[in-house]
Amino acid sequence: LEMSLHEGQANDALHNLRIYLCNKAILFRTTVRQAKSQALKTRAWSQVMSVQQAVSLHASIYTKTRKQMMKLEPGQDQLQKYKPLLHEQLKISTAVGNPNARGQRN
């Protein structure tokens, strides 16, 4: 029972991470790059930083939940599914959103 609760919490944290990382990529493309004045750039970066705080929060929740799951001796399938988060996985690339950019081919 406790393992299934931890699995649900980990799934929720991963889902929220995906949502916030997508939001961050969209903010970069629509707000930060489009900002022409210093005031708009500052406002755009403050929005990005608030989304980054949410990403950090959900990454922390996932890491703590995974740590608790490891104490309960999970099965092999759970070890495969709930891997440790790497710092590179929390970075975004806006190149995916621009299909006409140089070097982007099907």
Image: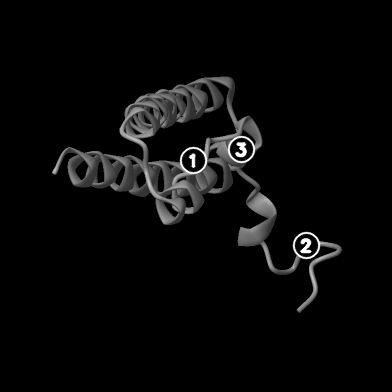
Q: Circle 1 sits in a helix, a strand or a loop, which is it? A: helix
Q: Residue at x 60, y 34 (%)?
A: 86
**Between disc 3 and disc 2, whose residue precedes?**
3
Q: Circle 2 sits in a helix, a strand or a loop, which is it? A: loop
Q: Circle 3 sits in a helix, a strand or a loop, which is it? A: loop
Compared with residue 77, is residue 12 higher up or lower down, i.e. above or below? above
Q: Amino acid at mark 1?
A: Lys
Q: Residues within 10 Å of mark 3 (few under 14, many from 20)?
A: few
Q: Residue at x 50, y 27 (%)?
A: 40
Marks 3/2: CA–CA distance: 19 Å
Which numbered tag is attached to residue 70?
none
Residue named by callout 2:
101
Whole-percent x, y for residue 30 in the image: 52, 47
Q: Residue furthest bottom?
A: 106
Foreground of the two, 63 or 90: 63
Whole-percent x, y for residue 97 in the image: 61, 60
Residue named by callout 3:
91
Residue named by callout 1:
24
Compared with residue 36, is residue 80 higher up or lower down, i.e. above or below? below
Query: Looking at the figure, which quarter contains the C terminus?
Result: bottom right
Marks 3, 1: nearer the viewer: 3
Q: Quadrant of residue 68?
A: top left
Please tell me how many numbered marks the rendered image carries. Answer: 3
Whole-percent x, y for residue 1 in the image: 13, 44
Q: Residue furthest left?
A: 1
